[in-house]
Image (spheres, helix red, strand yellow):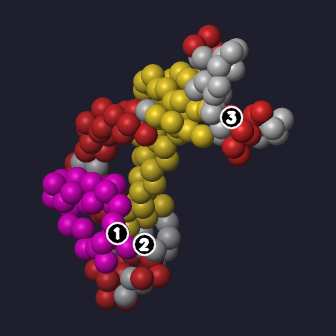
């Protein structure tokens, strides 16, 4: 069974490109059959943690207002500007399946990158003029945060590929496979 996440596909391709055969990708180990467990020297567990943080620029917020002498159906839109910060940590672990011994671990930090964003919001006029101003009545307009997040992820993709490829080399992992085989033989 192959998980639908792009990261799983990405890791499997890197491992295959290094000359290591991937038998299958599973959501959890309970899905493995006993013959699969016997034929697998090591299990790769990969974990991706994305950290996304917003920082608002207080000096650039345009506050909504009521324009005197005019009829308005809403308070003038508020424009909020800020920066979106993205960082990532990828943790790769290899362990021997039967003993559950961790044989190798690698943590890869993807440094923080940032980009500017903005979004608009407004309160409908009837909500405001009635004296009941509540954040649930807030109407959001154009929001660049999803596009900016996509751009940050795309711009870091080559860094992620290089870091993971450099971590999963056959030269570094060959001794781990041999050690796992010794452990498995010893435990029989």
State left or right for residue 99 relative to residue 170. right
Choose between 128 and 170: the one closer to the eye: 128
Q: Quadrant of the C terminus?
A: bottom left
> Mark 2 — residue?
27
Is residue 45 in view from this perspective?
Answer: yes
> Mark 1 — residue?
3
Q: Residue at coordinates 83% horizontally, 35% vertically from top-left?
A: 131
For residue 3, what is the image quadrant? bottom left
| Residue 32 is one of the magenta-drawn residues | no
Q: Please tell me which of labels 1 and 3 falls first in the chain.
A: 1
The 10 Å Cα crowd at callout 1, few under 14, some 14 to 19, many 20 or more, is few
Q: Residue at coordinates 61% horizontally, 24% vertically from top-left?
A: 76
Q: Where does residue 31 sit, x and y in percent of width and height?
A: 42, 82
Look at the image and give the residue range highlighted in magenta. 1-26
State left or right for residue 138 relative to residue 144. right
Above or below, 96 against 150 in this view is below
Q: Residue at coordinates 24% horizontally, 48% vertically from top-left?
A: 169
- Residue lying farthest to the right in this orientation: 131
| Residue 24 is one of the magenta-drawn residues | yes
């Amino acid at each position: 069974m192959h998980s639908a996440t792009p990261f799983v596909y990405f890791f499997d391709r890197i491992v295959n490109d290094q000359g290591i055969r991937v038998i299958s990708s599973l959501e959890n180990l309970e899905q493995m059959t006993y013959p699969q467990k016997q034929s697998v020297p090591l299990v790769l567990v990969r974990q991706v943690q994305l950290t996304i943080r917003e920082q608002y620029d207080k000096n650039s917020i345009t506050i909504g207002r009521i324009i005197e002498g005019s009829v308005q159906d809403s308070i003038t839109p508020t424009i909020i500007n800020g920066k979106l910060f993205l960082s990532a940590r990828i943790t790769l672990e290899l362990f021997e399946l039967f003993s559950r011994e961790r044989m190798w671990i690698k943590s890869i930090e993807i440094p923080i990158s940032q980009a500017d964003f903005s979004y608009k919001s407004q309160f409908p006029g009837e909500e405001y003029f009635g004296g009941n101003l509540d954040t649930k009545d807030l109407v959001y307009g154009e929001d660049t945060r999803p596009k900016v997040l996509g751009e940050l992820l795309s711009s870091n993709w080559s860094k992620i590929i290089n870091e993971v490829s450099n971590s999963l080399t056959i030269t570094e992992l060959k001794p781990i496979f041999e050690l796992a085989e010794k452990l498995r033989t010893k435990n029989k």
